[in-house]
């Protein structure tokens, strides 16, 4: 079956979307979604119907579903505001509303015969392989958990203090970022010392210790050259590593990052706030009552869905003990990589939310100003970095993927 709409052709038999005669890259799962919407364009497709057809009835979060819908819109030149082709019907589902011309190819007639009365169910996509978890040991004896997923050029995400490589892979906060990366690259993630599945009783919680973790992980995988993705305090770790090993880093992405830790920035008000937060961490971080951790969730992600907030709260509880969470926050307060910024000579993309209250925009701007030839992109979001339900998510993801693919 060949369907034409506007300048696009959707070829079911070849499983191909074309703009004119040029194939458009579409992830297999997104293509399944698009094919199903087009085939069922005569009615509104509910979430349950879509999940059954495309995901085989597996549990799928609203965030994941919306992420795939947005990807389908991008593939056909549509967006969430215009909705010229894929329309959201509030509280009911989605519908393909584009004007189409449809024809059945010869191959299709020979194989399938007459058109079916009811569209066949799309096969569940399996474009993203399962992650593989393994361990390595640093020079100072710390066991580190790492995960790899996907094939292709390696992209290494620097570890941060709120990670758990098994749990955040399924998180509605992180999954919409990790999955597209793993579908295009070999994505490497790890839990730094004191976090997640890595040793919780590490002797050295410091910037040097965190950089040592990154060195240990990439060396254990024998990665000669790779891209680095640093979020939050992982940005400083990435900067320090890149300055030390410039020949091994191809691209550097810094999102919500900073060069100076909160104590080094010298703001009395911020230091007082952080000290109060440390007291909350030490007294209530590990409790079953989430009230203490919700303070941190609201500070990092003021604009979340209820599902995202619950998931991030649980991730906090599982990622670190109260003692380690406090130790890491104190260590982050002492970060200072300002002298290393001019030494970063690799292509660098700096992304920062304009309304980030945890790490103000000016700190991201400082990175872009001091790293030679870095490009700065301001994201329209109040969250520490945008989440998949936000209007700015599509542009954020496009910036990241576009940069890494160059």
Image (cartoon, rainbow, N blue to C red):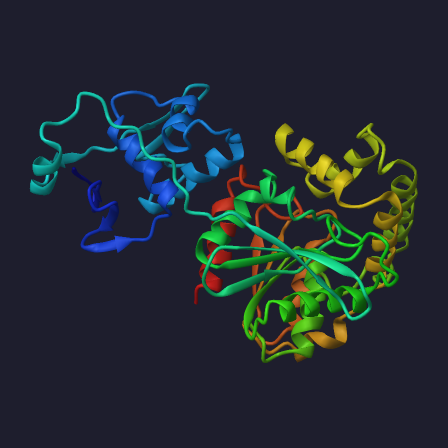
Residue 352, quarter of picture:
bottom right
The image quarter containing residue 316 is top right
Return the residue nearer the eye: 378 or 387. Answer: 387
Answer above or below: position of 20 versus 287.
below
Q: Is residue 396 left or right of residue 273?
A: left
Residue 66 vs residue 243: left or right?
left
Residue 145 vs residue 283, the one in the foreground: 145
The quadrant holding residue 166 is top right
| Residue 348 appears in the figure | no
- Residue 341 vs 210, above or below: the answer is below
Which residue is found at the position 63% from the left and 34% from the top? 308
Residue 403 pos. (x, y %)? 48, 63
Q: Residue at x 51, y 40 (%)?
A: 391
Residue 184 seen: yes
Q: Quick one: quadrant of the C terminus?
A: bottom left
Q: Quadrant of the N terminus?
A: top left
Q: Is residue 333 above or below residue 115?
A: below
């Amino acid at each position: 079956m060949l369907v034409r709409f506007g300048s696009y052709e959707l070829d079911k038999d070849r499983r191909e979307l074309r703009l004119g005669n040029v194939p458009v890259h579409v992830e297999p799962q997104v293509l399944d979604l698009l094919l199903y919407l087009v085939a069922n364009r005569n009615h509104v497709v509910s979430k349950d119907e879509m999940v059954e057809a495309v995901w085989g009835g597996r549990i799928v979060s609203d965030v994941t579903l919306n992420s795939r819908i947005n990807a389908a819109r991008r593939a056909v030149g549509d967006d969430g505001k215009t909705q010229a082709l894929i329309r959201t019907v509030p509280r009911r589902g989605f519908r393909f509303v584009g004007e189409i011309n449809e024809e059945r190819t010869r191959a299709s007639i020979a194989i399938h015969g007459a058109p079916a009365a009811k569209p066949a169910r799309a096969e569940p996509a399996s474009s993203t392989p399962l992650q593989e978890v393994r361990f390595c040991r640093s020079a100072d004896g710390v066991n580190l958990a790492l995960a790899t997923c996907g094939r292709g050029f390696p992209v290494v995400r620097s570890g941060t203090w709120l990670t758990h490589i098994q749990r955040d892979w399924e998180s509605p906060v992180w999954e919409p970022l990790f999955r597209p990366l793993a579908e295009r690259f070999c994505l490497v993630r790890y839990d730094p010392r004191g976090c997640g599945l890595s040793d919780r009783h590490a002797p050295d919680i410091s910037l040097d210790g965190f950089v040592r973790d990154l060195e240990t992980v990439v060396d254990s995988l024998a990665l000669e050259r790779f891209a680095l993705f640093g979020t939050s305090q992982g940005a400083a770790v990435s900067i320090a590593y890149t300055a030390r090993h410039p020949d091994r880093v191809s691209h550097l992405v810094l999102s919500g990052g900073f060069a100076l830790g909160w104590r080094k920035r010298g703001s009395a008000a911020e230091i007082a706030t952080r000290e109060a937060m440390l007291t909350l961490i030490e007294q209530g971080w590990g409790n079953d009552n989430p009230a203490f951790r919700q303070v941190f969730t609201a500070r990092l992600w003021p604009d979340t869905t209820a599902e995202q907030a619950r998931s991030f709260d649980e991730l906090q509880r599982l990622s670190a003990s109260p003692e380690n969470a406090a130790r890491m926050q104190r260590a982050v307060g002492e970060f200072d990589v300002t002298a290393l910024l001019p030494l970063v000579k690799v292509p660098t993309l700096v992304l920062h939310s304009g309304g980030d209250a945890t790490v103000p925009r000016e700190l991201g701007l400082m990175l872009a100003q001091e790293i030679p030839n870095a490009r700065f992109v301001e994201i329209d979001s109040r969250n520490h970095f945008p989440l998949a339900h936000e209007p700015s998510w599509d542009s954020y993801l496009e910036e990241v993927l576009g940069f890494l693919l160059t």
